[in-house]
């Protein structure tokens, strides 16, 4: 039976121990709710740390047995692992960098070692359970290495990964000493999900600049696999929050709130203690409101809940002390005998109390400095069944991309937050309702169940796409089939790429000239009755003419810019323009000046930057830099940037090997069509040819071609077998 395996740092249970007995209680978090529909079904399972250190093996067995009844599987961690993996690398290295607080990050080798070790621990548990055909969905920043570790052991398995916190820009991400290993781990997934398009873009940028990978739109080609990177904004359990208002306990809390705040308007703020949440700035903005607008004294209350979190860590302890001081100062300065401006609670509240506050508060103020999504804003919106109330939301929270009818603020702009509060306090009811209706529609539709379904559906589509993109190796059976089709045909055409397909790569491009064996092979193929042989290459037309002009071959040079039939002369594709070349040439030469061994080749309507002689690593780094620069400049100019094997080529978008091949097929009818090629430009031919054609990719199985061969030696061998009777 196929199963789905969910893997996250924590299991969706609260576990407590009393006298050696363990009590388990299901968690009410949004993720647990959304994934409940998956992990509770059949033999599906959720793997994670139970949240408690359990050293005794017998107790571990007892807890494992209890958890297995709930379709859960524990990963037991020692206190040292918790300190270095979770508190250390996850929360003192990744968390600050990913939240743009790099100044707080600590880069300790012991943290990294523990992070690697714990990811391996998770991998071992996954491997105990996973079988062929299973789906594995890995969650969040604590397990960035896990997808790659699973992929190494089970290359065919389906792996999804979702990151619940932001992904930083390349400039920040590269501060991490182990950045390449992290990216390689993440790229073990088939589908990678982030909350916002910005996060997706940052990941693609980091991958293309730090690793030797090709990225096209949102697909990363890595280790002969296509990895898709998508945006999936996470939702909440809308129905739960919309219906909680009718709960008798919530009604009781509401009654108390109405009695306590008869005259005052309530501004609600709920956060975990964290420097990324902008709590200090929020307090300063509220203080500024009371300073500038004394008319709100005794009329407005900031009801602030801060949920305790890691307050033994110096930065968090310091933050807590700062909050305490600031709240004390504001209350001391502005309070009256019957009114405190800030009602501050440093503790967590049950969901019924939170629901009452969501239902009662006139304004919900959510202003983090950086947040992956921020579900408090969505919970507030879902709770407002009368469509009233105002949400003030930081533009740095992922939710701001969806909840555009909130009042959007920059969390660093105290004046803007103050103005937003006054605008919210004075907003007419019809305007509140117009905005809230729009936001409730969004939150209702894009709920947690929709998010889960969307991700799982997309993962299935990606796996199908990967299968379709995988060319099958030409084995003995396939070779026999190709030979049969070839011999039964009366009119045949063979499209043959040159570099990497008929000859191997040489350090010097001029050294890759044809050898006697290749000349002999091409002569025999061209001389076979019914055969048309077309050499289709990115090489200069002068070079192809010099090498093959005296053979009975059709020649297509510079990807189709120049063409020549075996009897005719060279002619150029009409309407091409090369006025763009000086600007692009300057960019390429700047990179060449910094990269020993690289050089620029100029063709009639394209420019090529070669780095086959550059030391390994440096060439890929410079190529990624150049690709990123060129993409900005070429998009408006009708140009195409093509990464190839140790080359980057810029050419007119009209020049395309696929179009050139099709123009040849218009002149005659063929009953056998075959194309062989090894790089990105040859993919255009494979896509353009009719479905009955035999297409073969050389050196990679990730291709639109039907089949693949591993090297030019195998290509020559196959072509030799065609000519034999």
Image (tube, rainbow, N blue to C red):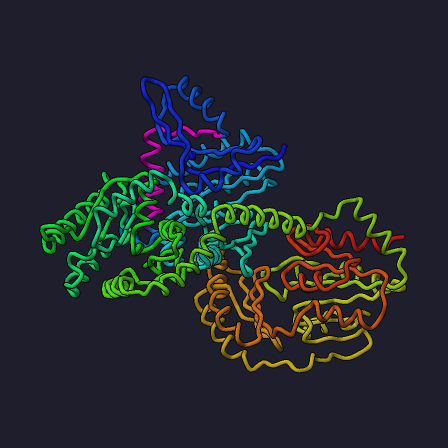
Residue 224 locus on image (x, y percent)? 60, 50
Compared to residue 324, the image places residue 210 above or below, namely: below
Total numbered labels? 0
Which residue is at 53% across, 32% downward? 127
Q: In the depicted view, which residue is nearer to us: 620 or 249?
A: 249
Quadrant assignment, res 488: bottom right
Quadrant including the N terminus: top right
The image position of residue 126, as x and y in percent, is: 51, 33
What residue is rendered at 74% in x and 67% in y?
A: 535
**Where does the image place residue 376, in percent across and percent down from the top left?**
35, 49
Q: Is residue 435 visible?
A: yes
Toward the viewer: 91 or 508? 91
What residue is rendered at 41% in x and 49% in y? 179
Residue nearest the viewer, comparing 624 with 233: 233
Our reading of the magenta stretch's main secondary structure is helix
Name which residue lies at 22% across and 46% down.
259
Q: Horizontal placement of 64 versus 320: left or right?
A: right
Membership of 528 in magenta stretch = no
Q: Is residue 216 above or below residue 640?
A: above
In the picture, measured across the screen, residue 61 lies left or right of residue 649, that is left
Q: Which residues are magenta?
A: 72-96
User: Is 602 located above or below residue 523 in the figure?
Assistant: below
Q: Within the magenta stretch, is there residue 75? A: yes
Residue 149 location (% of width, % of height): 50, 39
Residue placed most toward the observer, 571 or 400: 400
Q: Is residue 372 visible?
A: no
């Amino acid at each position: 039976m196929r199963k789905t395996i969910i893997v996250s740092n924590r299991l969706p249970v609260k576990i407590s121990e009393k006298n050696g007995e363990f009590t388990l209680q299901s968690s009410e978090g949004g993720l647990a709710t959304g994934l409940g529909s998956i992990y509770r079904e059949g033999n599906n399972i959720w793997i994670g740390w139970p949240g408690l250190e359990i050293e005794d093996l017998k107790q571990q067995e007892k807890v494992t047995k209890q958890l297995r009844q709930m379709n859960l599987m524990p990963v037991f961690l020692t206190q040292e692992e918790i300190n270095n993996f979770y508190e250390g690398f996850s929360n003192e290295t990744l968390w600050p960098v990913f939240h743009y607080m790099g100044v707080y990050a600590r880069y300790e080798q012991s943290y990294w070692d523990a992070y690697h070790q714990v990811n391996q621990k998770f991998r071992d548990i996954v491997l105990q359970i996973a079988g062929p055909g299973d789906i594995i969905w890995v969650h969040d920043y604590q397990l960035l290495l896990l997808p790659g570790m699973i992929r190494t052991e089970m290359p065919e398995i389906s792996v999804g990964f979702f990151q619940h916190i932001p992904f930083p820009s390349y400039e920040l991400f590269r501060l991490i000493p182990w950045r390449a290993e992290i990216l390689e781990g993440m790229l073990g997934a088939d589908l990678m999900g982030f909350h916002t398009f910005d996060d997706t873009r940052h990941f693609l940028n980091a991958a293309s600049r730090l690793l030797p990978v090709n990225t096209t739109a949102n697909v990363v080609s890595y280790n002969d696999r296509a990895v898709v990177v998508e945006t999936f904004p996470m939702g909440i359990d809308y129905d739960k929050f919309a219906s909680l208002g009718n709960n008798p306990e919530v009604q009781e809390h509401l009654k108390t709130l109405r009695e306590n705040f008869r005259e005052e308007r309530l501004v609600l703020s709920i956060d975990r203690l964290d420097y990324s949440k902008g709590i200090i700035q929020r307090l300063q903005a509220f203080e500024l409101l009371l300073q500038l607008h004394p008319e709100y004294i005794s009329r407005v209350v900031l009801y602030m809940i801060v949920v305790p979190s890691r307050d033994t860590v110096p930065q968090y302890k310091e933050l807590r002390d700062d909050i305490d001081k600031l709240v004390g100062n504001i209350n001391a300065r502005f309070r009256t005998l019957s009114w405190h401006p800030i009602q501050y609670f440093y503790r967590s509240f049950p969901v019924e109390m939170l629901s009452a506050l969501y239902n009662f508060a006139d304004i919900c103020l959510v202003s983090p400095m950086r947040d992956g999504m921020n579900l408090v804003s969505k919970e507030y919106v879902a709770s407002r069944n009368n469509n009233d109330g105002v949400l003030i939301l930081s533009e740095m929270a992922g939710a701001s991309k969806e909840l555009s009818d909130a009042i959007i603020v920059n969390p660093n702009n105290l004046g803007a937050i103050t103005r937003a509060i006054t605008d919210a306090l004075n907003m007419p009811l019809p305007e509140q309702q117009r905005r809230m209706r729009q936001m409730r529609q969004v939150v209702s539709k894009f709920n947690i169940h929709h998010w889960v379904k969307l991700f799982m559906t997309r993962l299935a589509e990606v796996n199908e796409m990967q299968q379709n993109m995988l060319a099958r190796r030409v084995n003995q059976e396939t070779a026999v089939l190709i030979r049969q089709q070839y011999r039964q045909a009366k009119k045949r055409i063979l499209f043959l790429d040159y570099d990497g397909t008929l000859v191997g790569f040489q350090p010097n491009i001029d050294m890759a000239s044809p050898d006697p064996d290749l000349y002999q092979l091409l002569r025999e193929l061209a001389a076979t009755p019914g055969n048309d042989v077309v050499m289709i290459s990115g090489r200069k037309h002068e070079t192809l003419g010099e090498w093959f002009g005296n053979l009975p071959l059709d020649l297509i040079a510079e990807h189709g810019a120049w063409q020549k039939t075996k009897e005719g002369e060279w002619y150029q594709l009409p309407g091409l323009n090369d006025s763009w070349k000086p600007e692009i040439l300057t960019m390429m030469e700047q990179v060449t000046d910094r990269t020993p061994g690289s050089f620029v080749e100029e063709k009639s309507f394209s420019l090529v930057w070669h780095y086959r002689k550059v030391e390994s690593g440096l060439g890929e780094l410079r190529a990624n830099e150049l690709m990123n620069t060129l993409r900005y400049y070429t998009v408006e100019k009708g140009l195409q940037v093509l990464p190839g094997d140790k080359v980057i080529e810029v050419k007119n978008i009209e020049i395309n090997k696929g179009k050139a091949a099709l123009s040849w097929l218009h002149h005659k009818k063929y009953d056998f069509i075959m194309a062989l090629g090894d790089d990105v430009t040859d993919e255009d031919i494979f896509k353009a040819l009719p479905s009955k054609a035999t297409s073969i990719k050389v050196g990679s199985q990730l291709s639109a071609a039907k089949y693949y061969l591993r090297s030019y030696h195998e290509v020559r061998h196959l072509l030799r077998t065609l000519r034999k009777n």
